[in-house]
Amino acid sequence: MYNAFFGFRESPFNLTPDPAFLYRSQQHEEALANLIYGVQSRKGFVVLTGEVGTGKTTMLECLQDFLSAHRIDFAYVFNSRLTVDQFFEMVAYDLDLQCNRSSKTDVLIALNQLLIANANEGRTTALILDEAHNLEWDVLEEVRLLGNLENRRGKLLQIVLAGQPEFDRKLDAPALRQLKQRIALRCMLRPFREAETFEYIQTRMAKAGMPNQTVFPPELIAEIHLRSQGIPRLINAICDNLLLTAFAMESKVATREMLDEVSDDMRLEWPGKAIPVSRPRFSRDIREPAV
Ligand SMILES: Nc1ncnc2c1ncn2[C@@H]1O[C@H](COP(=O)(O)OP(=O)(O)OP(=O)(O)O)[C@@H](O)[C@H]1O
Ligand SMILES: [Mg+2]
């Protein structure tokens, strides 16, 4: 909508986890390197955790790009509200297993054959699970069993689990201690620090076609950082709304007043936010009525 006004090739702050707009912060870089290393070196289980909106799915998208480019077979399960049967059906579908996909036994046999064939050719096979904190206990148990498949040279299936911090707490449950013990690598995403929020906004604006952005002045970015608490998804939503507001007001620069309006519309809460004083609409006359 506002792209032509600002001269963007595409919208800088889309909410999709698009690797084309990746900002390689040190922690994202490290997380991706860990995921790739975990899969390539056949570590077995790798876990990525992070608060809502910190970039887990984006990292998994980047990992998938890497795996596809290196012709590594993988299944990507992004819907975690699955029964055991649906889980196996999805795995079979993604890995193109030629079997009765609604029979768990058939899928397991076909999967085992594929894993052994791939391993014999020196090829790796991966299973990626997003939103792992929502996975049912029985599905997690199946995942653990899949992680047990191995030959003499190592694990046959590399399993990447990504989820919110409560996934770590779920792993502490006695029923999952076997799975927890098998995790070879862990990485975590935290919200951005202020300097990262600056670079993040610059990077996205540059990718959209504005290399030296002037729409968001430094002091406004500092305030965006505070109000978003460094969460990339919130930064995107705030900046997108600011661009829209600036466009509506035919201004090439976003202002503090616009940010206040956007924050109200988004019902944002942040540490130190002044609580609006609710003033009574009519002040009551407390004087005694004249007699
Ligand atoms: N390093 C990054 N570079 C570019 N964009 C990012 C980065 N990290 C996060 N984002 C953006 O932030 C938004 C949220 O990212 P993403 O969906 O990957 O988060 P998530 O951790 O999977 O969230 P959820 O917990 O809700 O599943 C997306 O729009 C994504 O493009
Ligand atoms: Mg996600």
Image (tube, rainbow, N blue to C red):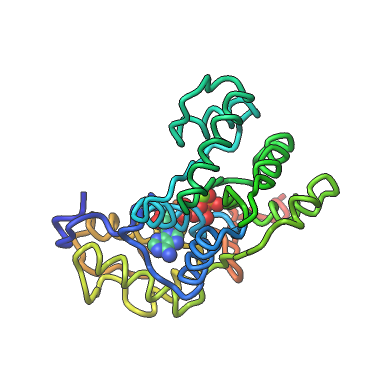
* Percent of width and height locating residue 133: 66, 46
* Percent of width and height locating residue 69: 33, 54
The answer to whether 33 appears left or right of 279 in the picture is left
Residue 233 shows in the view: no
* Percent of width and height locating residue 288: 73, 54
**Residue farthest right in this picture:** 174
Task: Classify 226 as above or below 121.
Answer: below
* Percent of width and height locating residue 31: 52, 66
Q: Depth check: give the residue in front, 269 or 135.
A: 135
Task: Classify 79 as above or below 150.
Answer: above
Residue occupying image coordinates x 14% and y 62% = 7
- Residue 46 lies in what quarter of the image? bottom right
Residue occupying image coordinates x 40% and y 70% = 24
Residue 111 shows in the view: yes
Q: How many marks?
A: 0
The answer to whether 121 appears left or right of 138 in the picture is left
Q: Depth check: give the residue in front, 115 or 282.
A: 115
Q: Depth check: give the residue in front, 206 or 47.
A: 47
Task: Classify 270 as above or below 103.
Answer: below
- Residue 108 lies in what quarter of the image? top right
The answer to whether 8 appears left or right of 271 in the picture is left
Task: Classify 134 as above or below 270.
Answer: above
Q: Depth check: give the residue in front, 240 or 18.
A: 18
Residue occupying image coordinates x 51% and y 76% = 193
Residue occupying image coordinates x 25% and y 69% = 206
